[in-house]
Image (tube, helix red, strand yellow):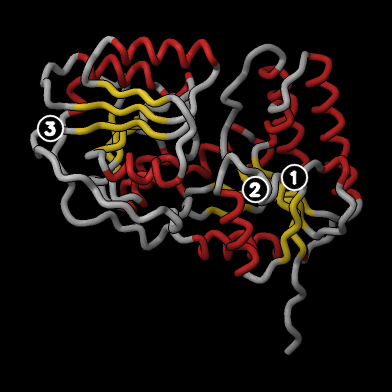
Amino acid sequence: MQAERRLVIGSWPGRTFAWNSFIASFCEALEAAGCEVVDVEDPRSLQTRIDVLHIHWPEQIFWKGGGAARLTYRTVSVLRALARLRRSGVRLVWMVHNLRPHDESGARRPLWAYLSRRLARMVDGFMTLSPATVPVVRAAFPALAGKPFADAWHPAYTDIPAVEAPVRDPAAIRYAFLGQVRPYKGVEELVTAFAANADPRHRLVIAGDAAPPEFAQRIAALGARDDRIDVELRRLSDAEMATAAAAADIIVLPFNNYLHSGSMLYALSCGRPVLTPSTAFAEGLAKVVGADWVRTYQGKLAPHHLDFTPPTGSADLGLLSWSALGEAATALYRRLASTAA
């Protein structure tokens, strides 16, 4: 029996993307599943022959900034490059990480509406990082509804440094928000809810790179009003992140604009429960790992949502594997590669 041809997958962005370790682990999972992976910095300058272009975050077009004219040029020229690739026989797969950019300022909002609409029509298939979010994605981008897709759970992280949790007073609950501190992540809401709890033994840690500068200043000022709140607004090393997670009783992620959450998986991978708003992703994940480990609430974060009892047992992370994600993606690629463009 003839062995299947090794598919060449272009990952945009590729492993050189330093701000999110997901990409490097995803590329490794594809290679373990039998693919060859090529880093794509910009589809407009791609010279290597590939079978599939896997698109992460098409809104990365906006990340370099610029005015309306520059953003429009970049959007149109990238779409033209993707169309050329597809005409040449390259299959396009969109991994839908977000329904919209976190920064929709200026021209980004109308350009995203145009970009996402065109991209949804153009791609051959799509992926989500949860079975629960497939209907959400199809509703947001109707052109994807009839297209081939794959879904696999966002994997747990396996490369977290081993650290020891400190010994402390069990009555002193330590809440934490870790990772990039951004306006859409509900940090101000968390500070307000925490401040309403008068127990002097409780602590809140907010740690991570904060932007934009005026938002960082606002969070620092809010933290300075309460001696129980520790604010560290800088990018943490892997060891510092792991240490901060180990020191927490629960990670609070009051995000108000997300489809999937790597931060949630990071907390669970550190053995820490999560408190987060009720979404398709969060509710689906709670069913997989246990409701004690993913605790959800409706509406705005309120002080009573911060009532805490330790979880029982351990989170069940068995289904959250990189191999499952790599195999699901590869199966979709092979399905698409077997059909005529």
Q: Earlier in the sequence, mark 1 or mark 3?
A: 1
Callouts 1 and 3 close, C-beta under 8 Å? no
Q: Is residue 321 above or below residue 287?
A: below
Regarding mark 3 in the picture, which secondary structure is present there?
A: loop
Q: Please tell me whether mark 3 or mark 2 is closer to you in this view.
A: 3
Label 1 sits on residue = 123
Q: Nearer the viewer, residue 41 or 207?
A: 207
Residue 288, image x and y in percent?
34, 53
Q: Residue furthest bottom?
A: 1
Q: Is residue 220 above or below residue 122?
A: above
The amino acid sitting under disc 1 is Val
Label 3, residues with CA under 10 Å away: few <14, some 14-19, many ≥20: few
Callouts 3 and 2 close, C-beta under 8 Å? no
The amino acid sitting under disc 2 is Phe
Left or right relative to 57: residue 155: left
Q: Residue at x 72, y 14 (%)?
A: 107
Label 3 sits on residue = 172
Residue 146, image x and y in percent?
66, 46
Q: Residue at x 39, y 30 (%)?
A: 207
Label 2 sits on residue = 126
Q: Earlier in the sequence, mark 3 or mark 2?
A: 2
